[in-house]
Image: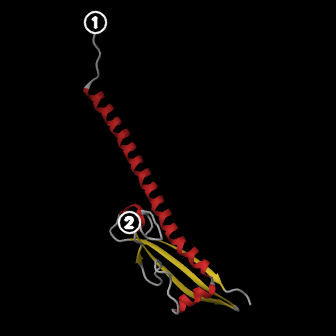
Amino acid sequence: MKKRAFSLLEIIIAMAFLSVAILSMFWMNRASNQGSMDAYYEFLAFSLAREPIEVFRGFGYDYLKMIADGSVSPPAWYSVGALKDIDFDFMSDMQYPAEARLFQRMVELSPVASGKLNGIRIKVTVAAKGQSRVEVWMSRKSVSLESIVMERPK
């Protein structure tokens, strides 16, 4: 009676196929994780950029014009004209996710005019802080959103 077994060559070939399959699964898992984290941090950056735009739009043109002129200071948690860290403070009135502290935000207000219409352009730029995990995971360096608040016709 003849015994059958696998040869050393067959075992090596099977191990090579198995290692390629396992490595490709690890690579797919890593790519999926990279995509998920990129989407999460990009969503967070857009949310952090959208929030001051909505707040400033709620102020209206007249109040925004006074902030842009420098006659009135903006709310304490919004720094206009300078890149400012977004702090996480659980006692603060403004609550952000803990990962928000890995970003910096700059709000810019500038007057615009088109014929008889006047407006204030609001531009918000959110960028990852240097040497943070957001820089590793997020494919963009920064996110910018803009809006215009127009003067009411008289």
Q: Which mark is residue 135?
A: 2
In this view, the residue in front, 21 or 80, is 80
Judge whether 28 appears above or below 117 on screen: above
Read off the residue under disc 1: 1
Q: Quadrant of residue 17?
A: top left
Pick out the residue farthest to the front: 91
Quarter of the image containing the C terminus? bottom right
Pick out the residue farthest to the right: 154
Disc 1 marks which amino acid?
A: Met
Q: Position of residue 134 (x, y in %)?
A: 39, 64
Q: Position of residue 63 (x, y in %)?
A: 59, 86
Q: Closer to the N terminus: mark 2 or mark 1?
A: 1
Judge whether 62 appears above or below 77 on screen: below
Dot 1: few (<14), some (14–19), or many (≥20) neighbours within 10 Å? few
Q: Position of residue 75 (x, y in %)?
A: 50, 81
Judge whether 2 appears above or below 82 on screen: above
In this view, the residue in front, 64 or 123, is 64
Disc 2 marks which amino acid?
A: Glu
Residue drawn where x is 56% and y is 90% of the image: 66
User: Regarding mark 2 in the picture, which secondary structure is present there?
Assistant: helix
- Left or right of 58, for residue 70: left
C-alpha span from label 2 to label 1: 66 Å
